[in-house]
Every structure is written in C-alpha cells, then in structure tokens.
Image: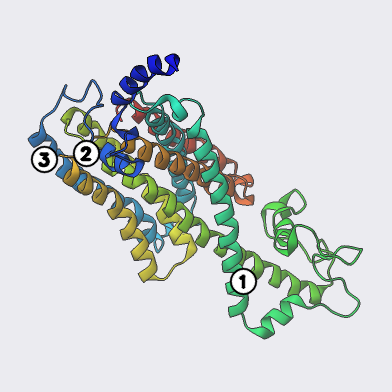
C-alpha cells in the first residue's frame, strides 16, 4: 500500500508529460493528418535558401519544361513509327530504347530506392518500428512480386480475350491435328508439356540450329519434323501464335510500365512543388526534364509496339505527360501548410517511393532489357549488341550521375 502511494505521483507525472498522440483527447486518426502539417520537425537546411517568390517562378518554369519534355519523349516513338529510321523495328529505336531502359533502371535503384530509405529512416520518425526493420527493401520486393503477378494475370486475360474473339474455324484449324499425328506440344505419355503451348512455340521459334538458319528464317519443315504440306500449315500457325503472343506482351508491358512511372511521377512532382528553395528547384528542373523525356520515350515505344488505337494511345500519352506537372501544381498549392519532414509525409513518401522502385526495377530488367537483349535479333547482330550495351550503360550512368544534384 505504501509502495503504491509512493509510485502514484511518479505515474501521474509521466502521463501528464506524455505526447498528445497518446493522451485521451487525441487518437491515432487525429494524429496522422495533423502530422502532415506539423512544423515541429524540419531539416536543418530548410531555411538556408528560402525565397518563396523566386521558387514560385521556378515552379512555373518546371511545369512547362517537364510537360514539354514528357510530351516530346512519348511522341517521338508514336509519331515516328511511320518513319523508317524511327520505326519500332529499326536498329536506331532498339539502341534508343536500351538507353531509356538504363534511365528507368537507374531511376528505380539510385533515385527511388535511396529516397525511400532516406524518408523511412529519417530522424523525425519514431525508432519503432521504422528503425527496427528494412521496410524499404521489403516494400520494393513486394511491389516487384505483385508486378510479376499483375504481368501474368494481364497476359492471361488478353490471351483469353483474343482466343474468344478469334474465328471458331481458325481455332479449330490451329488446335487440331491429323488422325494419328501427335498434337503440337504433346508429350509421349499423352499429357501436354508442362510449360504450355505458348512456351513450346517460343522454344521452336527462338532455338533453331546454329548457323545461317538460326539468324535467317525459322528453318525448314524437315527441321521441325513435319511434312511439306502439313508443315507449312503448322509453321504458319506457329508464326501467327508467336505474333499474337508478342502483341499481348506489348499491351501488358505498356500498361504496367505506365502504372509504375505514374506512381512515382506524382511523388517527384509533389516534392518539387512543396519546396520553397530555389537552390533545390533549379537542379530538379533539368534532372526531371531529362528523366521525363527518356521515360516517355520508353513508354511511347511500348505503346507503339502494342498497336493501340489512336484514341487509347493519345489518352495514355496525355496521362503520362500531365502527371508530374499536376503533382508540381498540387505541391505548389499546399506548400504553405505542408511540412515534408512531418512523420505522415515521410511515411507516405517512403512507402510510395519503395513501391515505385520495385515496379520500375522489375519492368526495366524483365520487360525492357531481358526482352530485347536476349532476343534472337540481338544475338544475330554483333554491332547492335555493342551499341545497345553501350547505350544501356550510358543511360544508367547519366541518370545515376544526376543524383548528385537531385
């Protein structure tokens, strides 16, 4: 009893000094919105180069510069697909796309991932749980895995959609075989190949005998183990299946890539918009314009290869080009009451940057770099290999170097 009487004043003093978020008058839901505008935690460099009027002028310059760069980047592949040297099957386009893939890869690894780590390990955040677990890598990993799942589900959806829209007689002709012959992709035991018919077709399409036949055409019907008449039908159906599969991949890649680009474009636009420091905004204008141009080029190339209708391609292009300028405008509008060093803002920025990093790294490595650099066209053209690898490393290196200023 005497122990409780002695301890009670200490406990009462502790609860009186407790932070407002743990008191009875406030809740977690009240604390989070207030933390977005709290000015109790700010960086030491916040007032070193503060000039609101000069920053406002630079923000309008940034909106115009980023908008023009994004429109130019995404328009070149879409408009230039009717020009021979800018068509999506030209060597110049392949090399430029490799450069853009390097830019996107460096954006994910060097810019987004490091910004997310800095935000989620900021001193303004409580040590628990943010300093006890590597949330940045975890969120990036989960984003990459969910992108893989979305990639798979999207491909399945469009393949089934094309299968339903195909002429029933064509489906019967492609899926049927002569009596006594083995169905394409069927194993000796009677079951289908475990990787499916599309992978089996891709195997025959990309793995022909070495030599001239491996780089010029698909080989003879004898190489495929087919008779002349029946082999011609199967070869035609294999080419048609391969073209449909490639088209489906381009459709899915373009949509998933735009999702990843747009998700981080909002964050970088918002970060520029809320800044009141001309010293911070000036290098960001050049860096984001460069970044937006080559991201737009890569996305425009995917949209062009997907062969969308003119209206759909225009909508996707405008959505990409406007996202970052809109983010800058929103940041400018809320800059007077927004504190980027508040816990709520840091957590939101860190999580979104981590997710964007995972999406961009997956798309750059799997759907841009691997798809082009492991293709038969690249393996059969040594000069294109050298140029593409140089452009890939150049794009990644230049985008990484921009991290010095932005």
What residue would you read off at disc 3? 57
Q: For this rendering, which residue is in front, 223 or 10? A: 10
On the image, the x and y values in percent for residue 384 come to 54, 43
Image quadrant containing the C terminus: top left
Q: For this rendering, which residue is in front, 214 or 41? A: 41
SS category of the residue bearing label 3: helix
On the image, the x and y values in percent for residue 301 come to 44, 55
Question: Is residue 387 visible in this depiction of the protein?
Answer: no
The colour scheme applied to this rendered structure is rainbow
Q: Residues within 10 Å of mark 1 (few under 14, many from 20)?
A: few
- Seen in the picture, residue 2 relative to 84 is either above or below; the reply is above
Of the two numbered discs 2 and 1 on the same chain, state the one appearing first in sequence.
Answer: 1
- Seen in the picture, residue 199 relative to 169 is either above or below; the reply is above
Q: For this rendering, which residue is in front, 344 or 227? A: 344
Q: CA distance from mark 2 to mark 3?
A: 19 Å
Q: Residues within 10 Å of mark 2 (few under 14, many from 20)?
A: some
Of the two numbered discs 3 and 1 on the same chain, state the one appearing first in sequence.
Answer: 3
What residue would you read off at disc 1? 160
Q: CA distance from mark 2 to mark 1?
A: 47 Å
On the image, the x and y values in percent for residue 233 come to 74, 75
What residue would you read off at disc 2? 338
Q: Can you tell which quarter of the image residue 42 is in?
A: top left
At a point 68% along the width and 60% down the height, the residue shown is: 217
Query: Of the residues tagged 2 and 3, which is closer to the observer?
Result: 2
At a point 38% along the width and 14% down the height, the residue shown is: 6
On the image, the x and y values in percent for residue 330 come to 22, 48
Of the two numbered discs 2 and 3 on the same chain, state the one appearing first in sequence.
Answer: 3
Left or right of 250? Residue 73 is: left
Residue that lies at the very extreme toward the bottom in this rendered image? 169
At a point 73% along the width and 55% down the height, the residue shown is: 213
Numbered tag placed on residue 336 in the rendering: none
Left or right of 160? Residue 172 is: right
């Amino acid at each position: 009893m005497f122990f409780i009487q002695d301890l009670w004043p200490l406990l009462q003093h502790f609860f009186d000094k407790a932070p407002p978020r743990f008191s009875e008058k406030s809740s977690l839901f009240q604390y989070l919105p207030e933390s977005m505008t709290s000015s109790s935690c700010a960086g030491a460099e916040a007032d070193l180069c503060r000039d609101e009027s000069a920053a406002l002028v630079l923000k309008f310059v940034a909106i115009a510069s980023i908008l023009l760069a994004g429109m130019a980047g995404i328009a070149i592949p879409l408009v230039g697909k009717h020009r021979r040297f800018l068509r999506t099957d030209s060597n110049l386009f392949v090399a430029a796309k490799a450069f853009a893939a390097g830019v996107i890869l460096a954006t994910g690894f060097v810019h987004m991932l490091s910004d997310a780590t800095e935000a989620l390990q900021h001193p303004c955040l409580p040590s628990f749980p943010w300093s006890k677990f590597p949330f940045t890598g975890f969120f990036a990993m989960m984003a990459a895995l969910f992108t893989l799942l979305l990639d798979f589900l999207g491909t399945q959806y469009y393949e089934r959609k094309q299968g339903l829209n195909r002429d029933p007689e064509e489906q019967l002709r492609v899926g049927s075989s002569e009596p006594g012959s083995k169905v394409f992709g069927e194993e000796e035991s009677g079951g289908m190949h475990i990787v499916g018919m599309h992978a089996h077709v891709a195997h025959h399409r990309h793995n022909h005998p070495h030599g001239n036949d491996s780089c010029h055409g698909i080989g003879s019907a004898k190489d495929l183990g087919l008779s002349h008449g029946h082999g011609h039908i199967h070869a035609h159906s294999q080419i048609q299946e391969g073209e449909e599969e490639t088209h489906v991949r381009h459709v899915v890649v373009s949509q998933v890539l735009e999702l990843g680009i747009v998700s981080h474009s909002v964050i970088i636009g918002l970060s520029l918009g809320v800044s009141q420091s001309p010293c911070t905004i000036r290098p960001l204008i050049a860096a984001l314009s460069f970044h937006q141009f080559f991201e737009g080029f890569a996305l425009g190339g995917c949209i062009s290869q997907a062969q969308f209708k003119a209206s759909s391609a225009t909508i996707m292009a405008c959505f990409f080009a406007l996202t970052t300028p809109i983010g800058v405008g929103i940041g400018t509008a809320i800059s007077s009451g927004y504190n980027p060093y508040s816990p709520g803002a840091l957590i939101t920025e860190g999580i979104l940057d981590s997710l964007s990093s995972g999406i961009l790294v997956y798309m750059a490595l799997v759907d841009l770099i691997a798809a082009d650099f492991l293709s038969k066209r690249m393996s059969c053209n040594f000069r294109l290999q050298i140029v593409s690898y140089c452009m890939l490393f150049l794009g990644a290196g230049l985008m990484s170097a921009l991290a010095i200023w932005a």
